[in-house]
Image (tube, coloured by chain):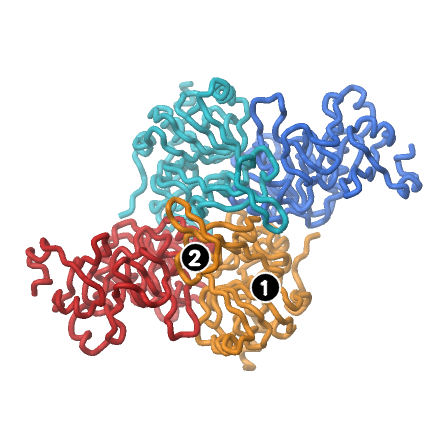
Chain colours: A cyan, B red, C orange, D blue
């Protein structure tokens, strides 16, 4: 019987190895798999390549991994915000590498990774600093750059509800990068608010089909509540 | 199928059952048109296999009861099917992103010809005006495992050959061949017989196969049906 | 006020010109915009390039346009079926051109058209007759072919329900090629069973957002019923 | 903005209203972070403009009432918003397919610099360690029309220039520039002033613009505010 639920976040992320490529969903705090990130800070894997749109918007995002010196390289579109100081410091002392990608190119590269497309052409970033060094080609009289797929060893995503098979639904703009990142990792780990019976989710309304989710963690709001109180 | 061939080996449903035995719990599997479709009906009890249909669903269930057919709930062969609890719908582009992105554990397909190297020809016959590729090229390139499920011969002509003479679907893509006569793995060492259907000898199998077959000594010594 | 509903199919398709590229949704009979096709047979535009997965599975599909000598070129994956005779005859006398594309490549080329990607690489069809003549390139040790986007002047799609803005939901496997084709045409025309008030469709469950639908036709089941009886 | 500049021209909300006037009924429009966001609040009565937010929604509505904020319903600036009836949610990849595929009628963006040829610089300042590109390069390349909505000068330095000196977002992409001082079209004949804000003379505008401006004779003769 299919069973993707893990007992706790620590077990769900135990095998993330040094040097792994990790996709992290979320847009600011919305749809951010912050419990998985916290567990990875605890677990301590190093030299990670992290792909995530925003770095520094919130303290419990990828910024926490950077501050804990676990990140070798960041691929993102928006590396600024109140919690970007540690990123800036590490860029200045050369201990971290930053690759800025246009947000749509980032999303499309991840989609390509999930869809078996190794590379595609886009006009985005042509004639700009972010297109420098990239192979170019004219289509329809317009300059395009060749962009390559991104595939993760692991993806951390946040969903609203899951079922035992791993189907996911999201809450409003919580989707953001989560559905596309779910498709592009060898192991996708989802933290969700609720796990329902198979068949309870509307089959017309499943944004991430079960095939893309390998491990599930159900958040325990009560425990989280206590932690917050203890702070 | 020649009359001679009907005397030995598995029936279509036995063949489908034999394939189904090898599908592991939790696998996501695409079934091609033809005999592979039968696999849906013979999944072993208690095993959860999630079937994919390339027109845009996961969780394909058995055929509906007569009168319960829904023309908007069909499989890749345009036949009415049902959806299992846990199933879901998506577009063709999402469906093929799933296939081409390497997310399906296995594709079970039919074949016109398969070579000893695992080359597959399944979309166009030389004597037909039109080919019909459908999703075959995507499935063979994208699925983690490609299993063929087919009659061993077509009108007495072996379908397993040294080199395909029909147009290729994809080269070097087949992992395992299930026929009415045997289960054969495509390996770096050539075609290796894993199992013979009841009443089939290795010699009979080889006589009906246009490429060299091997059989593991260890299997022969274990009283496998090959020694019958 | 946004109003995409047309009085009848004839008006919705009146401006389809000779030589237009037309995307037609449906997979066999499911999700087939057969009323729009029937109207186009009546309207008579010629030298069309038609992109549709199946040709010949049903009589009221693209086969009707072929039989009426309106089609110059077909791009499809599955040009066989009980109603493919006229296609075969026209291929033999050279009055129609057929381009067979693997189904996934066809879907991805249409998606690319809708997503602003002019071309992408795929391993599908490499080393085969369908890859012949195409530019190739190695990625990760595997041969890939370069495939180009498909964009339609018009798309005919079938949906279940629409709202006034043009949002669409589908019924089960009726989706098939409809959502992706909706994204890839300059003018997308949808025939639907029902048009509901704006706000009635679940915002989590809209498979085709309003931006992709330009014209709506509501089917009139009663009238269709009468036509069937009269046959 | 210098104190001098504050004396004349449109306030931020007047500027946003001026932009909103030009958005046509039924348009799909993306609003960038900053002043463009204000446009959402000043859409003329009775006009249906469907606003797109690149984090994955169409049908962005006004800010929620205090206490009604939902952290899972935010705009591209991560601020709480509401969804209008008819709105819907989708993933980032679908959202950017929409942008990059040319489906939005207009993108209204901020700018650091814009050249007389419509080159835009909006993602990186030379003196900052980090750029922040977000969706700017996608929107400028993908939207049918790119409108800038910005202060005419930054700390007294004109933002409209002959050639951008900051890193480009995209070349030749801006169609129209709305500032607190004027509405200016980027045309093949250069920058053409379409409208001057109250109290702004053409001479004053030119003095605050580091690229040559033109104004149509016909407009001047029609008693346009330019002659004030």
Q: Nearer the viewer, residue A182 or C35?
A: A182
B13 relative position to B101: left or right: left
User: How far across and down, in percent of the image, does residue B149 sit?
Assistant: 27, 63
Q: Could one spot residue D68 in this view of the protein?
A: no
- The structure residue drawn at horizontal position 10% and vertical position 62%, both measured from the top left corner, is B225
Q: Nearer the viewer, residue A195 or A124?
A: A124
Circle 2/circle 1 CB separation < 8 Å:
no
Disc 2 versus disc 1: nearer the observer: 1
B178 relative position to B32: left or right: left
Q: CA distance from mark 2 to mark 1?
A: 22 Å
Quadrant containing the C terminus of chain B is bottom left
Q: Which residue is mark 1?
A: C22
User: How far across and down, in percent of the image, does residue B213 sit?
Assistant: 18, 61
User: How far across and down, in percent of the image, does residue C169 sit?
Assistant: 53, 55
Q: Nearer the viewer, residue A171 or C216?
A: C216
Q: Secondary structure at mark 1?
A: strand
- Examine the image and state in which quarter residue A144 appears: top right
- The structure residue drawn at horizontal position 65% and vertical position 73%, both measured from the top left corner, is C43
- Examine the image and state in which quarter residue D191 appears: top right
For residue A101, the mark is none
As drawn, C185 above or below A149:
below
Same subunit, labels 2 and 1: the answer reads no
- The structure residue drawn at horizontal position 23% and vertical position 53%, both measured from the top left corner, is B187
> Which chain letter matches label 2?
B
Q: How many marks?
A: 2
Quadrant containing the N terminus of chain B is bottom left
B55 relative position to B213: left or right: right
Q: Which residue is mark 2?
A: B56
> Which chain letter matches label 1?
C
């Amino acid at each position: 019987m299919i069973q993707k639920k893990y007992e706790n976040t620590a077990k769900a992320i135990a095998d993330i190895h040094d040097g792994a490529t990790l996709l992290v969903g979320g847009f600011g705090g919305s749809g951010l798999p912050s419990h998985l990130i916290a567990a990875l800070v605890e677990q301590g894997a190093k030299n990670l390549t992290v792909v995530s749109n925003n770095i520094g918007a919130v303290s419990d995002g990828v910024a926490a991994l950077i501050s804990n010196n676990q990140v070798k390289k960041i691929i993102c579109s928006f590396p600024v915000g109140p919690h970007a100081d540690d990123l800036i410091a590490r860029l200045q002392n050369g201990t971290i590498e930053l690759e800025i990608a246009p947000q749509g190119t980032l999303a499309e590269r991840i989609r390509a990774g999930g869809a078996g497309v190794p590379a595609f052409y886009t006009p985005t970033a042509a004639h700009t600093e972010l297109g420098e060094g990239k192979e170019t080609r004219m289509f329809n009289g317009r300059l395009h750059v060749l962009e390559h797929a991104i595939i993760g060893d692991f993806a951390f995503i946040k969903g609203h509800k899951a079922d035992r098979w791993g189907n996911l639904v999201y809450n409003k703009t919580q989707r953001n990068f989560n559905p596309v990142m779910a498709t592009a990792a060898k192991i996708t780990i989802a933290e969700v608010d609720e796990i329902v019976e198979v068949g309870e989710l509307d089959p017309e309304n499943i944004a991430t089909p079960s095939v893309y989710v390998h491990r599930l963690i159900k958040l325990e709001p009560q425990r989280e509540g206590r932690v917050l109180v203890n702070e | 199928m020649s009359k001679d061939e009907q005397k030995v080996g598995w029936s279509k449903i036995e063949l489908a059952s034999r394939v189904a035995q090898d599908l592991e719990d939790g696998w996501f599997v695409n079934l091609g048109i033809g005999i592979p479709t039968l696999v849906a009906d013979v999944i072993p009890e208690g095993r959860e296999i999630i079937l994919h249909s390339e027109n845009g669903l996961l969780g394909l269930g058995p055929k509906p009861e007569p009168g319960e057919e829904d023309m908007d709930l069909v499989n890749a062969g345009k036949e009415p099917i049902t959806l299992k609890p846990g199933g879901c719908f998506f577009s063709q582009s999402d469906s093929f992103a799933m296939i081409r992105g390497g997310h399906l554990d296995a594709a079970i397909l039919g074949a016109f010809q398969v070579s000893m190297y695992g080359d597959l020809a399944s979309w166009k016959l030389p004597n037909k005006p039109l080919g019909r590729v459908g999703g075959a090229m995507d499935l063979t390139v994208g699925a983690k495992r490609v299993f063929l499920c087919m009659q061993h011969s077509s009108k007495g002509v072996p379908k397993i050959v040294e080199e395909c003479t029909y147009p290729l679907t994809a080269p070097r893509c087949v992992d395992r061949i299930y026929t009415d006569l045997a289960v054969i793995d495509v390996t770096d060492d050539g075609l290796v017989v894993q199992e013979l259907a009841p009443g089939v000898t290795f010699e009979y199998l080889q006589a009906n196969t246009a490429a060299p077959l091997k059989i593991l000594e260890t299997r022969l010594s274990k009283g496998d049906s090959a020694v019958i």
